[in-house]
Image: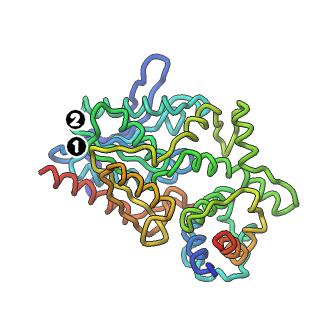
Amino acid sequence: MYLEEVRKIVGEVLGLGTRTAALQEDSALLGSLPELDSMGVVQLITALESHFGLTVNDDEIGADTFATLGTLARFVERKLT
Amino acid sequence: MNAAPAMSGPLFLDAGTGHGQRFCLYHAPVAVCRGAVLYLPPFGEEMNKSRRMAAMQARALAQRGYGVLQIDLYGCGDSSGEFADARWDTWLADAALGAAWLQAQLDQPLTLWGLRLGALLAIDFARRLPAPPQALLLWQPLLSGSQWLIQFLRLKMAAGMLDAAEADGGGTTTGMLRARLQAGETLEIAGYALAPALAAAIENLDAAALVLTGCPVHWIEVAARDDLPPAAAAVARSWRANGVALAVTVVSGPPFWATQDIGENPAVLRAGGAMFDAVAEALS
């Protein structure tokens, strides 16, 4: 699973600093991290696309995708397999 | 670092009758002048987020003997005009305005430096010059204009997504927004009115097709990995295959143009400074 890489990217893009390490698979993202506003969502999608070399279509992402670190990592995994 | 050298500071360039003024920040060279540098900023929030890094790099270059001009493009920052009226050609003309001012001021070879969308503008402008610039410094260049447009349109989509987190609904896709642009509608996104003509011009930009030969091109990429991400690597391969004298430096650290807080990335500044040292050394 891509949990480790996704955690690192979430931390860097949102500037979570030392809070990054505390993010677990079931940690809530959207609606829980104040840094994850609309700008944050866009930057996160962009960073994931760039890092993993994937293309995200808008109709495959929604609020569910960003629910937890785990849902986001699983989305990446699905895109790459 | 020393205090800002004399003559450095804000200034306005007159873009001609009816075209208003462009706000610029000039960093005069310290000691013997070795060259001129024109900085072309990214767009929107990215420009705001990256102001500090751009100023830090500009000051570091001034210390090396370069005169650096940071220009706010038409409809952006503190320059004249409404963003809704901004066009790609206007921005190319702004780049020419800045370059002409540096030429008159310093009479030194010009290096172009741009971040994100500004990097594409720098390459597009450089290709239109009668002779190639001395060098090109690209910070995190966008790989295509359509990539930029999608990212920008996603802001509107993400705003809908945040609402949808509370009540089920939302669902505006970037495809729907693009269709509205193509139908001639100006879209209001994150406080910017994006005109269809500007969107169309940017959407047609493709980094791989913007080949610039005849001068060193240095690409600095911030990534959470040791090499260029796949899509960027493909552009780099294509450039090299077409004769671009490309050097790539990948550094880690915060993506300062996109971070929530105003970020600094010293590795980017070091790599930028090193490029100028290498160009100067090759000339000496």
Q: Which residue is mark 1?
A: B35
Left or right placement of residue B211 versus residue B3 in this view: right
Measured from the top left, where is residue A80 in percent x and y?
Answer: 63, 71
Q: Are marks 2 and 1 in contact (CB under 8 Å)?
A: yes
Q: Quadrant of residue B221?
A: bottom left
Q: What residue occupies the far top of the structure in this picture? A: B17
Q: Compare residues B110 and B259 and report the one nearer the observer.
A: B110
Mark with earlier residue (2, 1)? 1
Categorize mark 1 by other alpha carbons within 10 Å: few (<14), some (14-19), many (20+). many
At label 2, the amino acid type is Leu
For mark 2, give the secondary structure. Answer: helix
In the picture of the structure, the residue carrying the numbered disc 2 is B106
The quarter of the picture where residue B219 lies is bottom left
In depth, the one of A23 and B127 nearer the eye is B127
User: Which residue is the extreme one toward the left?
Assistant: B284
- Kindly report the distance in space between the C-alpha atoms of the residues bearing marks 2 and 1: 8 Å
Q: Chain of mark 1?
A: B
Residue B84's disc is none
At horizontal 44% and vertical 41% (from top left) the residue drawn is: B121
Above or below residue B183? Residue A81 is below
Label 2 resides on the chain identified as B
* Camera-side residue of B254 and A1: A1
Q: Residue at x 70, y 36 (%)?
A: B181
Residue B196 visible in the displayed image: yes
Residue B73 sits above or below residue A76 on the image: above
Secondary structure at badge 1 equals strand
Mark 2 residue crowding within 10 angstroms, few (<14) / some (14–19) / many (20+): some
| Circles 2 and 1 on the same chain | yes
Q: Residue at x 75, y 71 (%)?
A: A67
